[in-house]
Image (cartoon, rainbow, N blue to C red):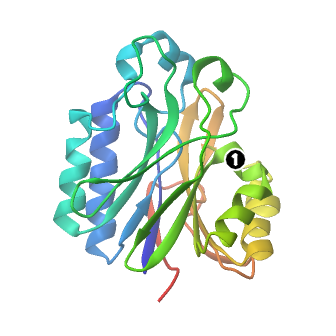
Amino acid sequence: MIVAATQFAPVAGDIAANVGAVAALVRAAGAEGARVVVFAELSVTGYEPSLIRDNPELVLTEDDPRLEPVREACRAVSAAAVVNGPVAGPGSPPGSRPGITTLVIGPDGGLLARYDKRHLYGVEAEVFEPGAVDGRFALDGVRFALATCYDNRFPELAERAAADDCSVYLASSVLGADNDSFTAVYPARARDFGLHVVLGNVLGPNEDGVGGGMAGAWGPDGERLADAGPDEPGFVLVKVAV
């Protein structure tokens, strides 16, 4: 099982541009053998909670037609995309708060899983609705867990993932280069619970600061397996299971 950890600089509020970037990375990573491609938190809109609050048209649905280029890319290279954005809950009335939602789009373009960020940080609590259940999906016999940025500060999520027979923990985040998560959080989650941890991160300015890149992965011993570096958009590949 090969997973791609991605990074790019989303354009604030430009869903079409960001979806185009996501689809291109899915195609490129899939062409190199990736079966799962992981993206950053709010990669579809950029990490812009205030902009999302003030512009309801930035909220997506699970079957949103604006995500069709990603579905097409997944089908073209037979890969799953782990994509995050503001997504309305199924059947939510107008005006309801969206989740900070990971949609796992499968190799056939269908929805494999939905996960809403459980632990909201700062202004997020004024804009979004927290999730209440853990995120899981399986592909090719490998079981995956989902977590989003601040979630990773809570070790019980990774503990439950390991107890639930997950071997890969996918983290969609927005981190600056000086964030201690690279040294104190992700390697600890991997080492303490025997998981492969794969991080999708951002580049460029956003409402929280400046994305520091360094998307990549840690092995079950806590050691870095892949690092995309601090500057260039793209992806790195990591073999996480056989």
Q: For residue 205, what is the image quadrant?
A: top right
Q: Which residue is mark 1?
A: 151
Q: Residue furthest bottom?
A: 242
Foreground pick, 94 / 202: 94
Give the answer, above or below, for where 222 lies relative to 72. below
Q: For residue 187, what is the image quadrant?
A: bottom right
177 left or right, relative to 215: right
Foreground pick, 100 / 199: 100
Foreground pick, 190 / 99: 99
Q: Residue at x 62, y 32 (%)?
A: 130
160 left or right, relative to 142: right
- Residue 144 at x, y percent in the picture: 52, 67
Q: For residue 126, what is the image quadrant?
A: top right
Give the answer, above or below, for where 55 lies relative to 33. above
135 left or right, relative to 212: left
Task: Give, as a three-letter code, the residue at label 1.
Answer: Asp
Q: Residue at x 69, y 80 (%)?
A: 220
Q: Residue at x 73, y 26 (%)?
A: 122
* Label 1 Cα crowd, 10 Å radius (few <14 / some 14-19 / many 20+): many
- Residue 18 at x, y percent in the picture: 35, 38
- Residue 54 at x, y percent in the picture: 48, 10
Q: Secondary structure at mark 1?
A: helix
Give the answer, above or below, for where 152 lies relative to 32. above
Quarter containing the N terminus: bottom left
